[in-house]
Image (spheres, rainbow, N blue to C red):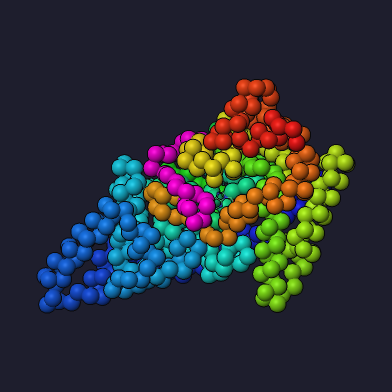
Amino acid sequence: MADNDENENLLGEDGQSRPKIIKKLNLEGKDIISKRYLSGAKRRPALILLVLFIVISLIQVKRDLFIRKSIFSASSSQPSIEVTYGGVKQNLTGDDLESLRNYILMNVPPEDFAGVKSNLVITDVLREAGRDAAYFNGSVLDHACPMTIRKSTKKLQKRVPDVIGIGFAKCGTGSLDFLDCHPSITFRTSEPKFFSTDKIVDRIIEKTESFPNPDFMSDVDFKNMQYELKDIKEDYMRRVPLAADDEILIEKSPQYSGGGSTEVRIKRAKAMKALNPKVKIIGIACDPVKRAYSQLSMKERRTEQMKSQGKKCGTKGCLKGTIEEAFEAFTEKQKQIKEHDLPMGFADYANQCKPFVDIVGAKNFHLVDGENLVQNPNHEWGKLLDFLEVDKEHFQFYKEEEKGFPCLDKPIKHCLNSSKGTSRKTDVRVQYGNFTQVWDRLYKETVLEMIPFFNICEEIDDACCEKLADENSSFSWIHRYACTDI
Ligand SMILES: Nc1ncnc2c1ncn2[C@@H]1O[C@H](COP(=O)(O)OS(=O)(=O)O)[C@@H](OP(=O)(O)O)[C@H]1O
């Protein structure tokens, strides 16, 4: 496959580096407060004060005012505790923590209440520094959710993921972080990139090729195959978080969908299925023009940041000249790819997903519309949660006006860090129309392959165009490619 930058490791992440344990906080706030403030003789009045404190906190919760107001201000006289929340270091007071805790408990499904309550702590593992400051804004949670919201009371154990996100970079894969706040799901920011190492995949294929298809194999064959794969599984499990057996463990590494030929993707899909025959796969696709601009814009940000630090940026992740020059070079490269009849990487969703769909089966594959995640978040997230077979009613988003992007509202208020959602604030088709007109035409044919493959419409007819014209429906961005003259 052509080197069209689509599969670069833009994040500069080291999927194998281990997070550093920085702090574990007991959110049963009473312990913290009582040990510090309640001494023997004054215990009774202090108890009354404590009850008053809890009542006041609950009133605050009811008014639904507290998160933005109390978490992000240090007005309380309570001692403050430094935590990383939403990718930024914050000082939370005892009051804030109690309010936060109550808000979450109020918003989880009633049947999850007891389990969530018993596990509810501030996430205790975080990375001290981002692996790519331009991308991660200098600090990153390894836990993707600032609080551990987990309903399971079962023991956490090493196991392989139930669900794998295979891409597509720049389409909103980072927003899968929100899933870690779901009581039934465990997800981490770090990308294991396990199946993008050819050597590992080849070993899995070699060890399993003599076995029948996992869908039809006997229990004995299954056990033997898993025994053969023991060491490899151990290696994989070291790169993903612990999870209880009744929760859904998800990992994503956008590199899985790119960086190779169809044959490579077939092998990756087979390897995924060998390690977990019931594996489900998620892809997030988006408008290739916006995707391409998101990548150029990230390179621009990174280049500026390196410059401001007096560092030279020699990697593929930086721009060589101005952003206009980058647009020109990129457009030229895309034209050459088209001329040589090579896959148009930025739009090649059908072709890149096919091997995964073929191997795991259509019912185990779900394609998310990355544009609709922003446009109509509750609808698009709801479809993903249905696919994952978990509750969607208590997992709700709102549009954060200032950010211009959806943030999680329930069960916890949480936005992605500020490095996410910058390029899409610019209408690239308005600002760089002379280039994007060319891109639109270059990507058209490849985008149209999605329509039959993902069953978006039976054919491109009036009914299909009418469906795609509804801006709130999934994949409405395809309307431009399928139903207009570009
Ligand atoms: N809720 C929410 N908040 C912020 N941003 C959101 C959200 N949902 C989707 N997006 C879009 O995700 C784009 C980044 O995509 P990825 O996370 O896949 O990028 S990366 O491949 O991990 O670098 C990112 O693109 P940029 O605007 O270029 O940053 C966003 O447009």
Task: Write down the region rendered in magenta.
Answer: 386-407
Numbered-mark total = 0
- x and y percent of residue 67 in the render? 36, 58
Examine the rendering and report whether any part of residue 238 can be seen: no
- x and y percent of residue 405 in the render? 52, 51
Q: Taking 374 as reference, is 306 left or right?
A: right
Is 216 one of the magenta-colored residues?
Answer: no
The residue shown at (79%, 52%) is 330
Quarter where residue 474 is shown: top right
Quarter where residue 309 is shown: bottom right
**In-front residue for pair 313/25:** 313
Q: Taking 123 as reference, is 404 left or right?
A: right
**In-front residue for pair 101/202:** 101
- x and y percent of residue 481 in the render? 71, 35
| 71, above or below 467, in the image | below
The residue shown at (57%, 32%) is 470
